[in-house]
Image (cartoon, rainbow, N blue to C red):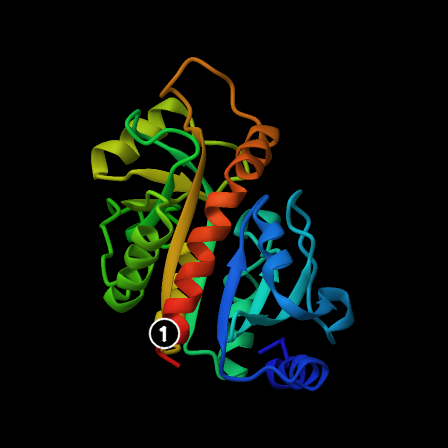
Amino acid sequence: MKYLILDMADYVGSRSGFMHGVAIILGSGLGDFTEQIQTPVVIPYHAIPNYPQPTVEGHSGEFVIGNYKSVPLIAAKGRFHYYEGHDIETVTLPIQLFHKLGVKYIIITNAAGSVRKNMPPGTLMAISGYMDCTFRENLSIPQIVDDISSKLLGCAEEASNRVNVKLENGIYCWTQGPAYETPAEVEFIRNLGGDAVGMSTVPELQAAEQLGIEAIGISTITNYAAGIIDQPLTHGEVIETANRTKDDFADLIGATIENIGELL
């Protein structure tokens, strides 16, 4: 393994004292949630020995570690995408690091495009299943994987009711990027049963499962995917919508973390 995970975990643990809490990966434009963390310790990625750097707008590249209410929390502001030229080992590096820090529960968030008109921008969606639509490994028709932690889905659903923030459930589809999907690709995904499309999260969910970590994905729907409406797609729209929904996102994520904290 090219990454010395134990050295990275030792560095983060010694700087922050974090161990055995909850972890969250914050997607594009969703990093403001870390303002809710009490007594934060900020560790830039570049300070961690041999840790890579994100290159996408909205991913600042740092861990923020502290407490949310009474729950120990480590938040990754910035992830690594396959389309940036990283291999899967690098894409899943935060999950591997969390595992070495004793994390048992992870929330993985992202900004995603809706492939259905009845799921408009601004919607928050719990990932109840996912598909790998990258065709990296073979040309078989993607199948829905629905072995998401029912325990954590329940935590999110209870949180949604408690803070009165609507939460949809849906199937998230991972595409390779970096270009947005074409209308034909979006129609294909919709016909497969997909609800949202994005360029991350699935490798992280898969890595968490392999490592025995319970994980849940929550998407902020920031735009309609290509062909759903007659309007061009921009990354600026993604960031703008994420900013507009950040209060509902923070309320939902915070309440979900509190619920997961009761499992520790």
Q: Can residue 87 be seen?
A: yes
Residue 60 on image: x %, y %: 69, 53
Residue 233 in the image: above or below residue 191: above
Choose top left, top right, bottom left or bottom right for residue 151.
bottom left
Left or right of 3? Residue 140 is left
Q: Residue 146 at what x, y percent from top left? A: 23, 57
Camera-nearest residue between 124 and 254: 254
Considering every residue shown, the one lying at the far right of the view is 47
With respect to residue 264, does 129 lie above or below?
above
What quarter of the picture does the C terminus occupy? bottom left
Residue 167: image x %, image y %?
Answer: 32, 45
- How many marks are shown on the rendered structure? 1
The quadrant where residue 227 appears? top left
User: Which quadrant of the figure contains the N terminus?
Assistant: bottom right
Q: Which secondary structure, mark 1?
A: helix
Q: Classify residue 256 as left or right of residue 21.
A: left
Asked whether, in this view, residue 146 is left or right of residue 202, the answer is left
> Which residue position holds label 1?
210
Left or right of 51, for residue 223: left
Depth check: give the residue in front, 84 or 69. 69
Q: Residue at x 31, y 63 (%)?
A: 155
Q: Does residue 199 show up?
A: no
Residue 93: quarter of image: bottom right
CA neighbours of label 1 inside 10 A, class few (<14), some (14 to 19), many (20+): few
**Mark 1: amino acid:** Gln
Provide residue 203's location: percent of width, then percent of height.
43, 59
Q: Is residue 50 above or below residue 221?
A: below
Q: Residue at x 70, y 82 (%)?
A: 11
